[in-house]
Amino acid sequence: MGLDLLLESFNRGHAGDPVTIARTREGFDVALSGELDMQASNDLSPLLEATLQECSAGARLVLDLSRVTYVASMGVGLLSTLMVKAARKTVNLVLLDIPPRVRQVMDVLGLLSFFVEERSPGKGGPA
């Protein structure tokens, strides 16, 4: 199934928390929203994997987490698995604007230091 169909299917099933994907010169920007609970993570996995497959070596895959309100262990696992697969493909995975609640979970688990993190201009504070 192609990326567009996977995106359409995900958004149909998660209308209240849609995902947007934009192709950029450097790769892809993916904006997530809502809860990364078990169901959302299971449904999101094929979409993120397909997006990663569309990236060429050296590309940037940016996950904008600014509208994520909650992350469960499955969500953290999804991000961790994507990070490993991106590294194997030499794709630069970037987590953008990690909300405090999500940051806290990842920090407690000791995983935050393994990710490349950025903040949008004007969001303040060091990344």
Image (cartoon, helix red, strand yellow):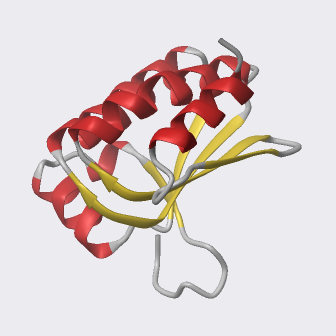
Residue 5: quarter of image:
top right
* Residue sitting at x 11%, y 57%: 108
* Residue sitting at x 42%, y 27%: 45
One can see residue 113 in this view: yes
Residue 90 vertical position relative to residue 122 in the rendered view, above or below: above
Residue 25 vertical position relative to residue 32 in the rendered view, above or below: above
* Residue sitting at x 40%, y 46%: 115
| Residue nearest the viewer, comparing 58 with 64 | 64
How many marks the image carries: the answer is 0
Residue 122 vertical position relative to residue 53 in the rendered view, above or below: below
Tell which residue pokes out farthest to the right in this image. 25
The location of residue 117, given as percent across then percent down, is: 48, 57
Q: Is residue 109 left or right of residue 111?
A: left
Placement of the N terminus among the 4 image quadrants: top right
The location of residue 84, given as percent across then percent down, is: 40, 23
One can see residue 80 in this view: no
* Residue sitting at x 27%, y 62%: 102
The location of residue 87, given as percent across then percent down, is: 51, 23
Q: Is residue 72 left or right of residue 86?
A: left
The location of residue 59, given as percent across then percent down, is: 73, 32
Tell which residue pokes out farthest to the left in this image. 108
